[in-house]
């Protein structure tokens, strides 16, 4: 059996979105900016897709949703744009963020520091989030932008975005959220949370790779990252990825239709898997279930190196992760576990399991069996793990 439990890294393409994008890869290949029929025949599908995106996050007509190549681009754009608009001009000095953002935020902040920007990184608590009080503590009228993710890619923990946006606005700062791991898993309503900027990526909600977006409230000014042609109203140059945009719109529409299913069925399967893991001795899971998006588990299985577990699971046809896919080529410890203050041994035993609406009960039962077997095998050959207490019913 093959079981894909790495949906926070990327997701399977929604079959309906796949069908929709095909004509735009071949017979309907026109450039939407061309004045001939090849160009104009792409327009109805593009309009539908943009409507789906606006409806998908409840954007107003006078907001902008600008299509980008990925959320990494969207995040870079917000940070570098704010640098040019507010900090380079001398109006403001600081950017505030957390210690657990995706590298698309973290590394961009480090780059901006090299240009003289002051960056304040708020430490997360033991659940892996920050509170509005934590933010208030570091705020001042010198802050240009606060950027905090909606949900964490590794733990699945949900941040109090509405309250964080409110505190930021009280100090005259703009607020950006990286909503990549929230969209398609929980309701994302740009009006309700009153954010100024919001990044998203199609391949995390069963859309294709290579396409994402940035929501800009009230179409406010933000210096472009990509200069060139007049695409996207001149805000983001580059010939439109028509097939990608069409598929992204449909994928978001469908993902939102499945939000109740995510909340009920995906959550039930996730909880079943999590409860089975916690039956094993010396297993911890980061963050309370009810504070996480419904699909994610970040567990630590004492005595079992994350990479060794991945190897065993891969042999059994199961795809999982030790943390962020971007960082998994090296054998570094899981960064969020370090941020939470877990000791280094714990941080090396991270296992991230992330489900989607395409997982079945049979797959989860199979995964439980294989994870338990791998834990038993790897603990039995571990030099650091003292054999489990004999009294435990699982015998591990
Ligand atoms: N932000 C978060 C929270 C993510 O999890 C990811 C991808 O893992 C990204 C940003 C980057 O997204 P993309 O692959 O679209 O650049």
Image: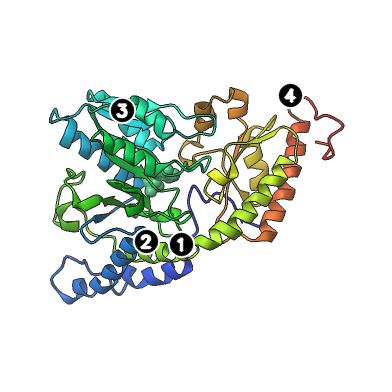
Mark 3 or 1, nearer chain start = 3
Query: Which numbered mark, 4 or 2, is in the foreground of this view?
Result: 2
Q: Is residue 229 left or right of residue 116?
A: left
Query: Which image quarter: residue 169?
Result: top left
Q: Are marks 1 and 2 in contact (CB under 8 Å)?
A: yes
Label 3 near ligand 1 (CB < 8 Å):
no
Q: Which mark is residue 383?
A: 4
Q: Position of residue 320 (x, y in %)?
A: 59, 46
Q: CA distance from mark 4 to mark 2?
A: 51 Å
Residue occupying the point 68% across, 33% down? 304
Q: Are marks 3 and 1 in contact (CB under 8 Å)?
A: no
Mark 4 or 2, nearer chain start = 2
* Circle 3 residue: 139
* Circle 2 residue: 56
Q: Which mark is residue 126?
A: none
Dot 4 falls on a residue whose secondary structure is loop
Packing grade of label 2 (10 A; few <14, some 14-19, many >=20) is: many
Mark 4 or 3, nearer chain start = 3
Q: Quadrant of the N terminus?
A: bottom right
Mark 3 or 2, nearer chain start = 2
Dot 2 falls on a residue whose secondary structure is helix
Query: Which numbered mark, 3 or 2, is in the foreground of this view?
Result: 3
Mark 1 or 4, nearer chain start = 1
Dot 1 falls on a residue whose secondary structure is helix
Vertical comparison of 321 with 92: above or below = below
Q: Which is nearer the eye, 141 or 39?
A: 141
Q: CA distance from mark 4 to mark 3?
A: 47 Å
Residue occupying the point 18% across, 48% down? 220
Q: Are marks 4 and 2 in contact (CB under 8 Å)?
A: no
* Circle 1 residue: 255
Q: Is residue 197 visible?
A: yes
Q: Which is nearer the eye, 170 or 208?
A: 170
């Amino acid at each position: 059996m093959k079981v894909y439990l790495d949906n926070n890294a990327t997701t399977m393409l929604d079959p309906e979105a796949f069908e929709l994008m095909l004509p735009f890869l071949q017979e309907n290949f026109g450039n939407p900016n061309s004045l001939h029929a090849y160009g104009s025949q792409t327009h109805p599908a593009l309009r539908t897709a943009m409507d789906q995106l606006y409806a998908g996050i409840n954007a107003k007509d006078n907001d902008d949703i600008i299509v980008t190549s990925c959320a990494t681009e969207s995040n870079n754009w917000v940070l570098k744009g704010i640098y040019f608009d507010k900090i380079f001009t001398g109006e403001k000095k600081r950017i505030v963020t957390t210690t657990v953002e995706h590298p698309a935020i973290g590394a961009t902040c480090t780059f901006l520091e090299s240009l003289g920007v002051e960056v304040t990184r708020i430490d997360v608590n033991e659940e892996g989030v920050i509170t509005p009080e934590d933010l208030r503590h570091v705020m001042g009228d010198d802050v240009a932008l606060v950027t905090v993710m909606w949900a964490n890619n590794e733990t699945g923990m949900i941040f109090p975005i509405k309250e964080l946006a409110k505190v930021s606005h009280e100090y005259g700062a703009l607020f950006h959220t990286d909503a990549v791991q929230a969209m398609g898993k929980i309701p994302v309503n740009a009006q309700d949370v009153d954010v100024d900027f919001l990044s998203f990526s199609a391949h995390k909600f069963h859309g294709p790779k290579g396409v994402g977006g940035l929501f800009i409230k009230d179409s406010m000014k933000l210096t472009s990252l990509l200069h060139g042609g007049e695409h996207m109203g001149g805000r983001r140059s580059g010939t439109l990825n028509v097939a990608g945009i069409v598929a992204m719109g449909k994928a978001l529409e469908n993902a939102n239709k499945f939000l109740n299913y995510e909340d009920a069925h995906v959550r039930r399967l996730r909880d079943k898997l999590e409860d089975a893991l916690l039956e094993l001795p010396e297993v911890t899971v980061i963050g309370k279930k009810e504070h996480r998006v419904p699909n994610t588990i970040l567990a630590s299985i004492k005595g079992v190196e994350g990479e060794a577990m991945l190897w065993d699971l891969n042999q059994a046809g199961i795809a999982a992760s030790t943390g962020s896919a971007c960082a998994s080529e090296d054998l570094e410890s899981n960064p969020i576990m370090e941020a939470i203050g877990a000791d280094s041994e714990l941080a090396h035993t991270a296992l991230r399991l992330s489900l989607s609406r395409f997982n079945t009960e049979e797959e989860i039962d199979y995964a439980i069996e294989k994870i338990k077997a791998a834990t038993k095998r790897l603990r039995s050959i571990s030099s650091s793990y003292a054999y489990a207490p004999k009294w435990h019913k699982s015998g591990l």
